[in-house]
Amino acid sequence: MTVLGEQDELTALFERLPDLVSRDSDLVRRGALCNAELEVGLGDVTYYLKIAAGRVAVLERQPRPMRSWQFALRATAEAWQKFWMPVPEPGWHDLSALTKRGVATLEGDITPYMTHLQFFKDMFASPRRLVRERP
Amino acid sequence: MAARLEPIVGRYMNLSLGDREHRLYFEEAGQGIPLVCLHTAGADGRQYRHLMNDAAVTQHFRVLAFDMPWHGKSLPPVGFEREDYVLTTRSYTEMIVAFCDALDLVSPVVMGCSIGGRIVLNLAIEHAARFRALIGLEAADFQEGWYDTSWLNRADVHGGEICAALVSGLIAPQSPDPSRHETLWMYKQSGPGVFKGDLYFYRVDGDLRPRIKQIDTSVCPLYLLTGEYDFSCAPDDTRRTVQSIAGGVDVTVMKELGHFPMSENPARFREYILPVLDKIRSQSAVERSKGPEKKRGVR
């Protein structure tokens, strides 16, 4: 079974997000009207993301101070690690499952997140594809 | 070329509920023991189409599924445009009993999922003697909410899209994509505020914890089956529920299934539900052999 290890491995996966999203024409189609600025917490590492017309236009690690965003999604390294397993365990398989069990939080004005909820769920799950493809 | 017709037949019933006239749509297939199936919140009876097309079920059971008022092909009552739809424990219970009475169903089995699973517990509390057996899928006497239901019906967020997106995570990752998306399609089609109105029963009015001890399964057998990927009604919610119930409850945790077992993965679900239906049939045969004094009559 594939097991994701250190934080570095998780951040390396996450930083593939712009490419993963752009290559998923169905995801881009569904996110065509999605524009948002957000922060993502991946364990101890913070990212700034700008979504433009369903693509990740900007992904910035440890963003500059006081950069504004509309909402933030932060989860523990363990949460992302289990969420991106090829077949995630029950209770670790969905972003709402993570927030319910208290290992992920949503902050700020989550209206863009809720308006495009399936897009964001699928976007954040997309690194799972890379894990599945591992030998 | 001959049409490939399914054995399911759909009809409309005019029914008075809560002193208001309703036009209720229902489907049925099969013959034998009546098995009334209750759909989840914000969806409709199509969730049971696979069960109704399963000869292993329909050769022994008359499977019926109605669309609750406001859902599917059942219309909301006259004047609906001037109110917010709200489902309550009382209105939901009345609806099921009225449906069974209207069709003269004798000693039916009722199987409900999610809100349907919750109301099955209330049937066990209030009307156990009327039923041959009760089956709760994804059932518990109470669950903690995991999102603010005000998101479900507001002008600036597409109701169908958000309802479907919220429940999408309750489907097991192993469920086949066509079944997953068919399940979600019903949520996308639901009328504005209907899912939210159903959840008033689930989240606010229908907390059965204070009354769950009243269930006595020696009066009516109760079967509870919960999918392991259901984090809304998790297996632990079901297990906690049965701790208070006298007479023993048959609890099954269904592997690789979520909150919509009958529609998200029908092939997997039948592995779990067929043995339960067999057990109910066997029990019925035993009771028949014991004579009329043991027969559980609806009326």
Image: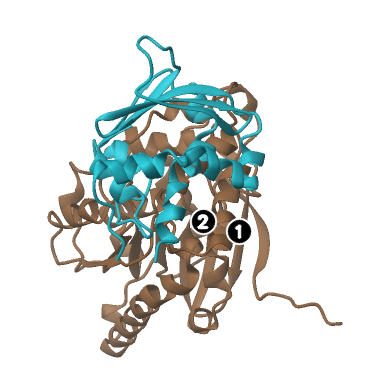
Chain colours: A cyan, B brown
- B188 vs B69, nearest the viewer: B188
In the rendered image, which quarter contains the N terminus of chain A?
bottom left
The quadrant holding residue B245 is: bottom left
Where's residue B133, x and y in %? 33, 69
Judge whether A90 appears above or below B155 on screen: below
Q: Residue at x 38, y 57 (%)?
A: B258
Q: Which mark is residue B99?
A: 2
Amino acid on which the number 1 mark rests in the picture: Phe
Q: Extreme top residue here? A: A66
- A52 vs B30, nearest the viewer: A52
Answer few, some or many: residues within 10 Å of disc 1's Cα (few below 14, many 20 plus, some between 14 and 19).
many
Where's residue B99, x and y in %? 51, 56
Q: Is residue A42 left or right of residue B32?
A: left
Is any atom of residue B239 visible in this view? yes
Q: Label 2: state its secondary structure.
A: helix
Where's residue B46, x and y in %? 58, 59
Q: Which residue is mark 1?
A: B26
Q: Residue at x 43, y 48 (%)?
A: A127
Q: Is residue B30 left or right of residue B109?
A: right
Q: Is residue B12 left or right of residue B287?
A: right
Amino acid on which the number 2 mark rests in the picture: Phe
In the rendered image, which quarter contains the C terminus of chain A?
bottom left
Identify the chain of the residue marked 2, using the numbered disc in the image: B
Callouts 1 and 2 on one subunit: yes
- B182 vs B219, nearest the viewer: B182
Frontmost of labels 1 and 2 is 1
Do the numbered discs 1 and 2 sit on residues whose CB atoms are within 8 Å? yes
